[in-house]
Amino acid sequence: MSNPPLSGVRVLSMAEQLPGPYATLLLADLGADVILIERPGSGDPSRRFEGLFASLNRNKRSVVLNLKDAQDKQRFLELVDTADVVMEGFRPGVMKRLGLDADTLRQRKPSLVFASISAFGQDGPLASVVGHDLSIQGVAGMVKVPPGQESRACVPTLPLADIASGMFAALGVVSALLARERGQPGQTLDVSMLDSLVSWMSIFLVPRANQLPVRDLPPLDPGYGVFATADGRQLTLSIAGEDEMWQSLCDLVGLPQYRELTEKQREARVLEIDPLVRQAVAAWPLDRLQAQLEARGIAYGPVRGDSEVLSEPQLVHRGLVAHGVGPAGQSFVKQPVLFNGANFDIRCPPPALGEHTEELLGPSGPSTPARGVQQTQPLPRARPAT
């Protein structure tokens, strides 16, 4: 699509590592002009992991500024005049010490949306505590390891606190921009990684707080799990209480004695039934079993490895993956929301450190301002991919 919904919005980002870059990735993919404000020398610390930085920073530009230097600080303030959003991910209090906090910047530009992402929030007993994803998951109740069984194998693979807070930050920014369009002033967003995860945990926490039954997740249904097939491959079955699906599965794999069991009965006898389902499934080659499962309307999915995901025919059909981006011909995963049935092109590859400093600031100051500020020439956009 040629006109993404956030075209004309400029975001200055000092939020590093993963939460902020994921938030601004979502905004950039929707058309925002995201400018990374990076420290001299090393830039965003995630640059030391080339693949991580590349996965989060396409469609963005990079400027190098030392915000402790008076001249660079002034150049940043002039760049703020052209922006709609400032996002930062420092520990609480750092932006105030720099003289660049929300109140100060909004005195200069009342319409500015100022978003902060931190581990535990801008205030409260844990506000000054340093915490990365694992520590946040622990406080949120997501790390459940029996005493005496602690090991590296217990560490979660996916950084859920980082991703959750990034998504909430992007949602908050878009909501604040909508409110501004409706006549409200710029707003200050306080996004806590802990708050974000606890929101995701609502389906467990709210029932317990109200003495209500908690839905078992993953479900105890013996038709729910990862199963091996006869040819050494794997698939998932995801029957989560659907009695008709269970009956169809029993008919297919030859377990008539369990066919009429209800969800509660199956759950009560899961230790008995589970190995029998596994034995029955293991008699089938994957391709033949998949065809039968699909024909009978039984919930399933093949298990893909990382190297197979991006070539999954369903994702190819949906256009989720972009190939051949930039001079290096890189591949990227697009943002997943289709607008009127289509997605948006990736405009440019991840920027080199400071690649756009001269383009945006130059010897005479920043480029022309974004929407809401009088412009004398068109707003520079990100360099297109080649």
Image: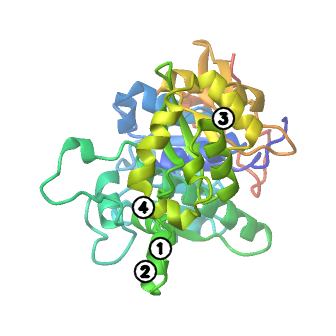
Of helix, strand and loop, which one carries label 4? helix
Query: Which three-letter amino acid code belongs to the residue tagged 2?
Result: Arg
Query: 123 above or below 273?
Result: below
The label nearer to you, 1 versus 2, is 1
Query: Which three-letter amino acid code belongs to the residue tagged 1?
Result: Val
Q: Position of residue 370 (x, y in %)?
A: 72, 49
Q: Position of residue 136 (x, y in %)?
A: 33, 60
Of residues 108 and 272, which is closer to you in this image? 272
The residue singled out by tag 4 in the image is 193
Q: Position of residue 180 (x, y in %)?
A: 73, 69
Of residues 106 and 130, which is closer to you in this image? 130
The image quadrant where one finds the C terminus is top right
Q: What's the mark number on residue 334?
A: 3
Of helix, strand and loop, which one carries label 3? loop
The residue singled out by tag 2 in the image is 208
Find the distance from the CA under tag 1 to the CA under tag 2.
7 Å
Find the distance from the CA under tag 4 to the CA under tag 3.
24 Å
Label 1 close to label 2 by CB (< 8 Å): yes
Find the distance from the CA under tag 2 to the CA under tag 3.
37 Å
The label nearer to you, 2 versus 3, is 2
Q: For the point 76% across and 58% down, which residue is it?
A: 372
